Image: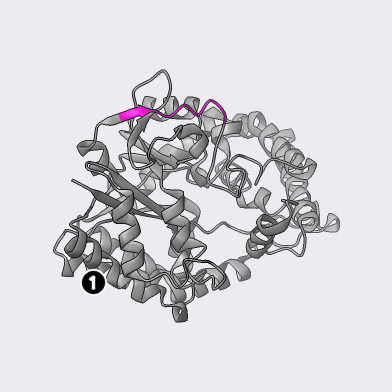
Amino acid sequence: MRSVTLCFQVHQPFRIKPYTFFDIGKQHSYEDEGHNKLVINRVSDLCYLPTNKILLQLIKKYKGQFRVAFSISGTTIEQFKLYRPDVIDSFIALAKTDCVEFLAETYYHSLSSIFSANTFIEQIEAHRKLIRSTFDYQTEVFRNTELIHNNAIAETIKGLGLKGMITEGIPSLLESQSTNNLFSPAQTSFPIILRNCILSDDIAFRFSDKNWKGYPLTVEKYSSWIDKSLKKNENATIYVDYETFGEHQKKNSGIFTFLRKLPGMLIDTYGIEFMNPSEVIDYHEIHSVYDAHETISWADVEKNLSAWHLNSMQKEAIEKIYSLEPLIRKMQIRKHTEKWNKLQTSDHFYYMSTKGMSDGEVHQYFSPFASPHDAYLHYMNVVADFELEVRKKKLFS
């Protein structure tokens, strides 16, 4: 059997508002509610609702043969509940088909897997609980924030009782092996599904690029590439930002027509099945070892932590927020813990990136701030006020 896994990352952060030095000690509301609502409304109308509608139609049309997986961060679900409950309803409708899998992840889309083992586990457990209560679904497979991965992280996830995880397929770690196989980390047996970065990025980044030699990307062309990439008993995992559909790749690019036609071409023309991640793990045997002794991710050209933890601003900001962990745990005040968790969201540090060329353009595209330096200043001012409030509460408790 040859198969394809379609997996979509759905994430929106709670963005902080411009917060100056003169705001410290005076006002303690940090979120840019107007901007957050604006983005959620825009992306819901352009992407989430129309794409969910298409997926539901495809699931019904192919009577269970078409299947998809979602990894939806806790911060995104919270914002859907605040601003767009109709989007939650559309995901619930998909969940009821039994053709959709929801993945476990860190609730706050954080870097806790690198900087706080206890927080990492707590955020995973909180996210699994949220998925159960929202979609009546028990998660079985994990994907870390931005596919961050190393051997130690895999061991932690195995210890939580999850059946497997997804991460980036990096050629240097594969040693000429196909990314379409099932792997295991070094020194432990635990299923790891690898993202096929070429097939994924063909849709996510190159679909509407008129300078790309593969343009235009037709369903016929793309399906033939999938067919050629798959040997017997292999699975190609196509993992992209869900916002690819309608937000990053606009409707007039033909992306929705492409999505509508893809399942039929793969199923009817090439006999390729659709499998969700847990099904891949159940069906396929582990092929070989994927030894991620150094930390990897799916971000930028380097595929490491440099998107969030490279320059001095990023390092200082991360060190500061995680240095507050002992204080937060000692205080055990829910609203402070929640604010602290939200300030861990990886996007805050992503906006501080000063990486150049194409990667830098991508970072700035997502940032609500005029520059990485502005992102750093506003974030550090917020953290300064937050720490002041927590320590003041401790003093009088």
Q: Is residue 17 left or right of residue 128?
A: right
Q: Nearer the viewer, residue 251 or 42?
A: 251
Question: Considering the image in quadrants, where does the N terminus appear?
Answer: top left
Q: The residue tagged with tag 1: helix, strand or loop?
A: helix
Q: Is 245 inside the magenta-drawn segment?
A: no
Compared to 210, does 175 lie above or below?
above
367 and 262: which is toward the camera: 262
Evaluate whether residue 250 shows in this view.
yes
Q: Which residues are magenta?
A: 287-294
From this viewpoint, which residue is outermost toward the bottom?
252
Name the residue nearer the viewer: 361 or 152: 361
Give how far across and how far down residue 380 sits, in percent. 77, 48
- Image coordinates of residue 374 in percent, x first then y, are 79, 58
Residue under label 1, please give it: 57
Residue for point 36% across, 32% down: 183
Name of the residue lying farthest toward the top: 187
The location of residue 108, given as percent across then percent down, is 52, 47
Q: Main secondary structure of the magenta part?
A: loop
How many dots with numbers?
1
